[in-house]
Amino acid sequence: MDVLEKLTILTDAAKYDAACTSSGGNRTAKKGYIGNTSSSVAGCCHSFSADGRCVTLLKVLLTNRCVYDCKYCVNRRSNGDIPRAAFTPEELADLTISFYRRNYIEGLFLSSGVYRSPDYTTELMIRALRLLREQHRFNGYIHAKAIPGTAPELVEQLGLLADRLSVNIELPSEAGLRALAPEKTKHAILSPMRQIQTRGRQSREELTKYRHAPKFAPAGQSTQLIVGATADSDLHILRLTQGLYDRYRLKRVFYSAYVPVVEHALLPAKDVKPPLLREHRLYQADWLLRFYGFRAEELLDEGTPDFDPRVDPKCSWALSHLDFFPVEVNTAGYETLLRVPGVGVTSAKRILSARRAGRLHIDDLRKLGVVMKRAQYFLTASGKLAEGLRFTPDSLLRGLIAAERPQLPQQELVQLSLFDPVGVPG
């Protein structure tokens, strides 16, 4: 099998891994090296750097051979219906450099099935990355997957070669892991996450004292979990997400709507469509956790464990807290403004800046980026609502549903690429 045939197989096998991102990378140009993270081929995907620039990555598995038999995974050991392939470290390094020199890519996203053992697979990944960094002197962005169960010393070596590491948490609950991926354990997944978080903090402290100290995963770590393969509620998933951000300082948690690829009694039927709208709502809620100051327990509770698919999570929160509104834009603080549907981080900062020059009126808000088709119900400017606005709780819900509809795909929903906006304007 030649390298291009392997590329076709292993890029297709990588398509279910959503946690592919380059945000946070800042590996600047170095004399004598090629590549710089600031700067329709198989395996090429698009991500965005921290400053918003588009970055093209080669997204590929080292191998789709796997000793595990996770029931939800197309690459599981017992699946005899797919072709298997594996790159040698030399092939992968040469392919990456070849793509880079042709200006196809600016970086690499490398994951893998577990070939023989986690340690053996990680050693192959380290060899490939070492060839890139040391022999080819590649200075571009590299995101590598740390495999649960890998020895800490190998995770350390991987982190010194990659810009970002990620450990897939896979399923939202330990019960789900026992049922669908019994060869994986919660401890095996969380141990490298804890190591990456601790070692990353140590690396940052060292760099404040020694400018040339080695960098360990300078762009941090992320993870991915599958939505819809188990019966876990949105509340359970959001609590898990909140805990991961709090304990491990993750940069991102990615959600992947389960795509039925196999028949199994414990999994949704193959004719069931992926829960893409649910995935979309979780991304919107995740945004609220990271940038808007919300906590998981504010958005959902035991009485309402799942998001209302008709409106976004922020509107849903506002509907259940009508006593909080209306908010007066001329006096409200930043944190209060962020609670208003239709007001985002940027528009809230613009409001604070603009009102220093004089009192704001309703007509001024649209110019500041406020999405008035949602915000009009929840704020006042100089004590006034939008002119002619009248509503009841029922008509308010209908108005928000109507405002939401254009934000969703009009045709059949498609899988989020995770490199597109997640649809949370405020």
Image (cartoon, grey):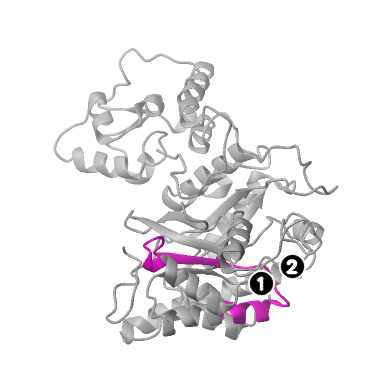
**Residue at the (72%, 57%) spot, across then down:** 73
The residue most toward the left is 357
Image: magenta residue range: 100-126
| Horizontal side, residue 214 vs residue 348: left or right | right
User: Percent from the top left, x then y, of residue 298?
Assistant: 55, 44
At mark 1, the secondary structure is loop
The answer to whether residue 190 shows anywhere in this view is yes
Q: Spatial distance from mark 2 to mark 1, Cα to Cα?
A: 8 Å
At mark 2, the secondary structure is loop
Q: Is residue 278 above or below residue 400?
A: below
Q: To which residue does mark 2 refer? A: 184
Quadrant showing the N terminus: bottom right
User: Quick one: 230 or 355, which is closer to the camera?
Assistant: 230
User: Percent from the top left, x then y, of residue 151?
Assistant: 64, 82
Quadrant showing the C terminus: top left
Find out whether residue 111 is within the magenta segment.
yes
Report the amino acid beneath label 2.
Lys
Instruction: Mark 2 and mark 1 in contact? Answer it, CB < 8 Å.
Output: yes
User: Percent from the top left, x then y, of residue 44?
Assistant: 48, 57
| Horizontal side, residue 133 vs residue 26: left or right | right
Marker disc for residue 148 = 1
The image quarter containing residue 25 is bottom left
Report the amino acid beneath label 1.
Pro
User: Quick one: 262 or 149, which is closer to the camera?
Assistant: 262
**Residue at the (61%, 78%) spot, across then down:** 122
Find out whether residue 81 is within the magenta segment.
no
